[in-house]
Image (tube, helix red, strand yellow):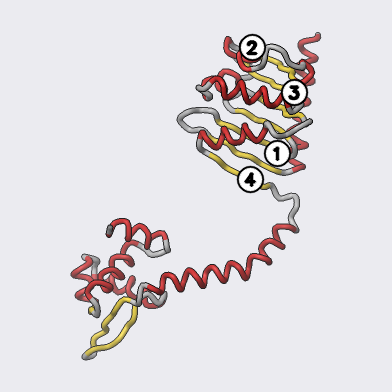
Amino acid sequence: MKQNLEKSLEFLGLKKEEIKIYLCLLEFGNLAISSISRITKIGRVNCYHHVDKLVKKSYLISSKKSWTNIFSAENPQIFLNKEKQRLNLIKNIMPDLMNISSNTPNKPNISFFEWSDWIKNIFTKLETLKDTEIVSFSNFSKLTDFFEDKTFLQNHFKSRLKNNIKTRFISPRDEKSDNFVLNFFPKEFNNNLLEVFLISSNEFFFESEITIFENNIAIINTTKQNPVWVIIENKSLYKTQKAIFDLAWLWATSFICS
């Protein structure tokens, strides 16, 4: 129980030495520095330093007894009172903070995820973008390995097609990428909703996914050891990345046709 208590107090902003001192005085009552140092096994000089900081933070009460400085722990209710003060302060400054944020419309909104379930949630979100286009620098082989449940990708792309979402992929070529559409797309669908270009894996190998959609850029590391998804929401950055994809697409189609 004491270990959990110490972790909780550390989360509330106290350092390990400060926690030891506060709990010591809470348990033993009024003590001089020498006694605090002996019980907590914190060196006397360091003990003076931490006790002084705790007094300034109002966690300890200082008094004198026979010319000796004596210290005691403040009522634990102080933690609740301090959090209430912080909450009130946050409520008071929040309108000003939101006002500053709203005045910088070009500032990117960045979200970061590093759990497999979150990555699945983002794929599910992509299914809801009706009547739009999603373009991706992809790696079909890594994508196949990441989603061990084959039905997840099958259902995902089925939903994309159902919602009239057009998708363009550029992916390195290998055996898995050759069979990707066959394995994960329905047997019959509107061919206008899917275009794929497979490029040389020796010259152009993508380690990560970059998916570009509706003013968002999603960068995905689809490795089981370290799955990461970063989403950047910004119209200007989206337009630039979409232009880069279109340029790569134009080069790919020109190369194939020549």
Marks 3 and 4 in Cβ contact (< 8 Å):
no
C-alpha span from label 2 to label 1: 28 Å
Upstream in sequence: badge 3 or badge 4: 4
From the image, tell me which residue sits under label 4: 110
Going by the numbered disc 2, the residue's amino acid type is Leu
Q: Quadrant of the N terminus?
A: bottom left
Residue 140: name its quadrant: top right
C-alpha span from label 1 to label 3: 19 Å
Upstream in sequence: badge 2 or badge 1: 2
**Secondary structure state at the residue bearing disc 1:** strand
**Secondary structure state at the residue bearing disc 4:** strand
Q: Which of 243 and 116 is in front in this view?
A: 116
From the image, tell me which residue sits under label 1: 216
Residue 161 vertical placement versus 235 (above, below): above
Crowd class of label 4 (few under 14; some 14 to 19; many from 20; radius 10 Å): few
Q: Residue at x 39, y 73 (%)?
A: 77
Crowd class of label 2 (few under 14; some 14 to 19; many from 20; radius 10 Å): few
